[in-house]
Amino acid sequence: MYTKGFDIQDVAKFRQWIAETRNVLLVSHMNADGDACGSLLGMTLMLDCAKGDKGLMTPVLPNGCPKNFTWLPGADRIVSGEKDRALWQERLKEADMIICLDLNAASRTDMLAEELSQARCRKVLIDHHHSPDKEHFDLIFSDYAISSTCELVLWLSYAMWDERFMNRDVATCLYAGLNTDTGGFAFSCEQPSCFEAAAKLVKFDIHPAEIHNKIVNTFSVNRMQFYGFALNERLKIYPSQHVAIMVFSLDDQRRFGVGGEDMEGLVNYTLMMKEMEVGALLREESGRTKVSLRAKYDVDVNMIARQLGGGGHTKAAGATCIMPLDKTLDAVEQLLGIKNVEPLIIGAER
Ligand code: 5GP
Ligand code: MN
């Protein structure tokens, strides 16, 4: 079982707040991944069961649900802060409680951050990132040693209600997050509780292989061709530093008709080479650059991401730099110790 446990008073307080509340807004981060979508919808569906017709649950994602998670139960209810602005603002005004999931600070909700910070209702945080923003939440369930927010939601629901509101749909959502945040149970799964959580979910007759296929094996032909281009022409390898890095301009992305969602997971290829220990992916967006960092062993990429104004986990972190691509690359090269070092393969010039 989950060894860290929860503060019993916090659990009792949360259960009480749920009982007293009618309109709940559930929010996760920009560019949602499986853990964001899974924890958001798993919690929404359990609260539906807990409240029945005495509650209105609204799951919100700043820029909506990514394509490969639209099949999750309840995904059709997700309000996009970007596309459904009026509905988001209406529900925010009516909210008695806001539950933030899989983020450690309101800023991770991008364009929703300011309105979220200004909201005066009760705010609860359920998350597994380092350094939760303690000032802006009234109640925090946070553990950076746990595999995923979905795992935390599962144990919290057991602490509050045992199995009362668990069902196949909830289990499917939570398993999706466990699967994605551990890379299919390959990393971030050092604690036995991760596998115990998976075992509990599997009992609800979910289909792990089908869930995995629906999340991972979903490439379009364009995306597949882009991956070929990325590996052939945009991968730079620094053998002595054990670093590999990929950089994509807006032009690269336009050429293949791909965007951020299509690059989810691409950074992991940098670590597939035996000698590589740290990998980075830089993606140009208009007016800013998105950085993804990954590590295999001892390097703490969360510390590196924080120096870029981002954060995350020890072995998977990221940042959104309000700088052009070349300036961001310069900063990343400095931090990774590859500035002015000749790579083994120089992209397109090869
Ligand atoms: P990814 O590289 O897959 O986009 O993100 C990996 C992890 O890094 C995420 O789970 C999240 O914890 C963190 N992360 C990614 N982008 C950002 C960002 O812009 N700001 C912060 N603070 N963390 C980020
Ligand atoms: Mn997560």
Image (spheres, rainbow, N blue to C red):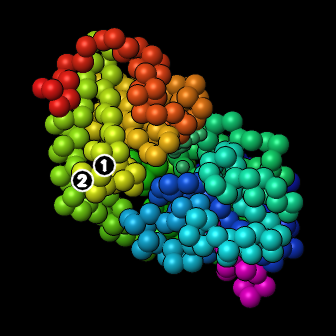
Question: Residue 162 appears at what percent x and percent y?
Answer: 68, 68
Any magenta on residue 87? no
Identify residue for label 2: 256
Disc on res. 253: 1
- In screen coordinates, is 329 left or right of 163? left
Residue drawn where x is 42% and y is 74% of the image: 71
Which residues make up the magenta segment? 47-61
Answer above or below: position of 144 versus 156.
above
Q: Residues within 10 Å of mark 1 (few under 14, many from 20)?
A: some
Residue drawn where x is 61% and y is 65% of the image: 81
Any magenta on residue 54? yes
Instruction: Provide the secondary structure element on which disc 1 rests.
Output: helix
Is label 2 within 8 A of ligand 1 (CB to nearest ligand atom)? no
Residue drawn where x is 46% and y is 26% of the image: 327
Instruction: Provide the secondary structure element on which disc 2 rests.
Output: helix
- Which residue type does callout 1 highlight? Gln
